Image: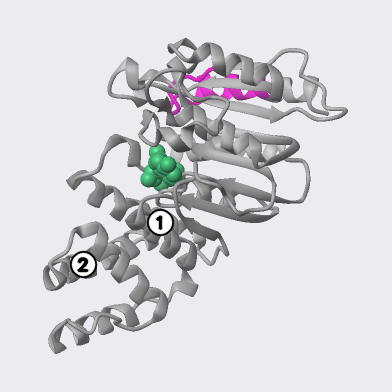
Amino acid sequence: MKMAPVEQLFTLFNETALVLQEELSCTYLEALAETGENLFNGSVLQNEVSEITFKRLEKQYKEINLDNFTKEEIRKAYQLVILKGMKENVQPNHQMTPDSVGMLISYLVDKFMKQSSFRLLDPAIGTGNLLTTVLNQLQKNVQSIGIDIDDLLIKLAYINANLQEHPIELFNQDSLEPLFIDPVDAVIADLPVGFYPNDVRASDYQLKADKGHSYAHHLFIEQSVRHTKHGGYLFFIIPNGLFESDQAQQLREFFKEEIIIQGVLQLPLSMFNNKNAAKSILVLQKKGEGIAAPKQALLVNLPNLSNAVEMDNILKKVEKWFQDNKR
Ligand code: SAM
């Protein structure tokens, strides 16, 4: 029986990564980056592999023609192999954004961003799964920029972008250091949550802690707002307790000065291991001349996303909100 396209690509990535992992004595995720690079270039780029492995890999790559796969098929197959690699060892803050959340963000970006062409930044691009999910869903001309501090994850993002033929501009750096990018129309980010160890850098931010380490996720919000045009939108995946922490008062003041809260969509608790790990999608707009706040922010408790009936009801409510507030 013929394999489904995603399965066929998954099998290729997985089998060739296992061979390279063994030959190069590296981790599965590192081997995955290598095999992705090979597939994109149509040749085996690692000189150190034995002749027999070289021939075997070359044969496997030749059997696949990427032109026969859609961008979404490539993204999904790549996502599945990365998930397999991440099971071995990955810290919670580096986890890939799941598809269901990516789809919701895509829907929201599409609804809020009325222009047919815009600049989009993901300052915590990781593997690129969230950003490419959004790019694949939008029928718009989007120039995108991705930043990540982790060398391996950004390499995976670079290969993801190449394989899906998305021209994403990538920067491998700390996103809280100065960014050399032009202002963007929108930001998406699955925020890394926790303390930011660099107090000197943090001291440049209004949202720095009065004492001790600052919260990275607060600084990420401020940095993103700085690089967004007036009237631009920001879509963040945030911990539910964002407005209840010991530093929440500063965040509220910052929002009052700079931001209009457009919406908070709480993800279903069933998606998370425990209540404390649960997250929401926060939609912000940077204040500017002539930019009015919505009559009421969009506040939604999302049901279990596999519950079609409840999801349908909620989406109707969301659509109604857009009709009343965003015409
Ligand atoms: N959306 C990503 C995806 O689909 O793969 C996952 C994002 S993950 C939850 C958070 C990311 O933030 C990680 O990739 C991590 O390396 C990155 N990160 C953490 N601190 C950072 C910093 N100071 N500057 C840039 N990136 C950072």
Q: Nearer the viewer, mark 2 or mark 1?
A: 1
Residue 56 appears in which quarter of the rendering? bottom left
Quick one: quadrant of the C terminus? Answer: top right
Q: Position of residue 104 (x, y in %)?
A: 54, 34
Numbered range of the magenta stretch: 300-318
* Residue 210 in view of the camera: yes
Residue 189 position within the rendered picture, expressed as x and y whole percent measured from the top left: 51, 39
Name the residue: 29% across, 55% down: 81
Mark 2 is surrounded, within 10 Å at the Cα level, by few (under 14), some (14 to 19) or many (20 or more) other residues, namely: some
**Residue 1 in view of the camera:** no
Residue type (three-letter) at the residue carrying disc 2:
Glu
Quadrant location of ligand 1? top left
Secondary element at tag 1: helix
The secondary structure type at the circle numbered 2 is: helix
Magenta run includes residue 233: no
Locate residue 50 relative to residue 203 in the image: left or right.
left
Q: What separation in Å lies between label 2 and label 1 (alpha carbons)?
A: 22 Å
Confirm if mark 1 falls within 8 A of ligand 1. Answer: yes
Task: Identify the residue at image location x=72%, y=13%.
Answer: 296
Residue 310 image position (x, y, % from top left): 51, 19
Label at residue 15: 2
**Vertical relation: 173 (above or below) 296:** below
Q: In front: 188, or 184?
A: 184
At label 1, the amino acid type is Ile
Return the residue nearer the eye: 115 or 59. Answer: 115
Q: Is residue 266 left or right of residue 290?
A: left
Residue marked by disc 1:
154
